[in-house]
């Protein structure tokens, strides 16, 4: 998972694009994988961004209600679990003929290993338009600091 | 130009151009949202996963028997954020469906809630399912 997380480097999909495509197509199921890693494309999709102060995890979880997601942090591992209702279980679903069932339904779990230095006490999460944004503050000692040059 | 250089140029340039085009395309590429489609007596319904799309950034249109579903992903990102990992690569969704004559295109309704689009395509009265009674002889 750690390796996976850092797979996309800056600039986003720029120079590494070709390499990334190669990795996507050939390397997904060979070699050894992290126990908690999920296959590419698993629900919910995740993007991770970094600023000087925090790691931001964007979880694309459409149709998932707030009360159906659980977020926990253990050291530098962010765990997500939850469920999404199956529209075929809807009380109004009687008499529906289904032509396509491409959307995920059921329970999901994802674990994201972040670099060391996450302050587990300063994690914020908000859900909007089906995107869950989790902001994990970095501990002060790993944030960049400006060094002043002393006049001699 | 030596023979080797010529061969290299010929072989590398199209590949390089293709890579650049692919990288450009990747950034602009539309994501195909997964859908569920079901039919009832009076309508066909499409559910599409489009997280990050707001009612304002959503576009559902019908033209020449084609239903187009498009949406821009509007996610607030802090200043100076750099990408570290991405499952979702793109900034918009697009998917198209062809409609038959049985759909009443004036009655199409779309709503988006928690990033799930629901498009209801009502069937014309003349095309609704009628049950045929079998007469006992």
Image: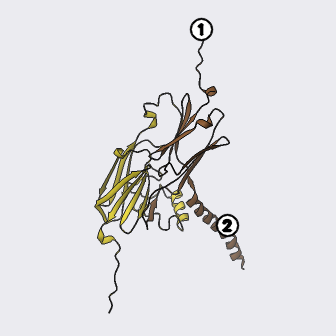
Chain colours: A yellow, B brown
Q: Which of marks 2 and 1 is in front?
A: 1
Q: Name the residue under label 2.
A: B14
Q: Name the residue under label 1.
A: B136
Instruction: Residue A1: tell me if it is visible.
Output: no
How would you rate the neighbour count of disc 1 (Cα within 10 Å): few for under 14, some for 14-19, many for 20 or more?
few
**Which sits earlier in the primary sequence, circle 2 or circle 1?**
2
| Percent coordinates x, y for residue A117 in the rendering | 31, 66
- Callout 1 secondary element: loop
Residue at the extreme top of the image, as rendered:
B137
| Most foreground residue, A125 or A43 | A125
How would you rate the neighbour count of disc 2 (Cα within 10 Å): few for under 14, some for 14-19, many for 20 or more?
few
Tell me the quarter of the picture where residue A86 sits: top left
Quarter of the figure that contains the C terminus of chain A:
bottom left
| Percent coordinates x, y for residue A76 in the rendering | 32, 61
Label 2 and label 1: CA atoms lie apart by: 73 Å
Quarter of the figure that contains the N terminus of chain A:
bottom left
Image-based side of A35 in relation to B1, left or right: left
Same chain? Circles 2 and 1: yes
In the picture shown, does residue B123 fall above or below B5?
A: above
């Amino acid at each position: 998972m750690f390796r996976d997380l850092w797979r996309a480097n800056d600039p986003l999909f720029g120079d590494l694009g070709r390499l990334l495509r190669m990795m996507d197509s050939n390397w997904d199921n060979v070699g050894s994988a992290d126990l908690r890693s999920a296959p590419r494309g698993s629900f919910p999709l995740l993007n991770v961004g970094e600023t000087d102060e925090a790691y931001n995890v964007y979880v694309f979880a459409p149709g998932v209600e707030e009360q159906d997601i659980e977020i926990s942090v253990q050291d530098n591992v962010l765990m997500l679990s939850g469920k999404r209702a199956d529209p075929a279980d809807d009380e109004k679903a009687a008499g529906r003929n289904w032509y396509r069932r491409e959307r995920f339904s059921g329970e999901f779990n994802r674990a994201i290993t972040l670099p060391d230095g996450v302050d587990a006490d300063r994690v914020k999460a908000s859900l909007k338009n089906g995107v869950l944004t989790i902001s994990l503050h970095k501990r002060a000692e790993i944030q960049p600091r400006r060094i002043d040059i002393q006049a001699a | 130009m030596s023979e080797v250089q010529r061969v290299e140029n010929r072989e590398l340039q199209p590949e390089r151009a293709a890579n650049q085009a692919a990288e450009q395309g990747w950034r602009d590429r539309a994501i195909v949202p997964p859908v569920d489609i079901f039919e009832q007596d009076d309508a066909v319904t499409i559910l599409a996963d489009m997280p990050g799309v707001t009612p304002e950034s959503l576009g559902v249109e019908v033209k020449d028997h084609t239903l187009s579903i498009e949406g821009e992903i509007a996610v607030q990102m802090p200043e100076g954020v750099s990408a570290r990992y991405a499952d979702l690569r793109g900034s918009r969704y697009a998917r198209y469906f062809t409609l038959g004559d049985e759909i009443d295109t004036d009655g199409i309704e779309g709503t988006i809630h928690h990033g799930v689009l629901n498009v209801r395509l009502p069937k014309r009265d003349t095309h609704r399912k009628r049950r045929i009674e079998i007469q006992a002889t």
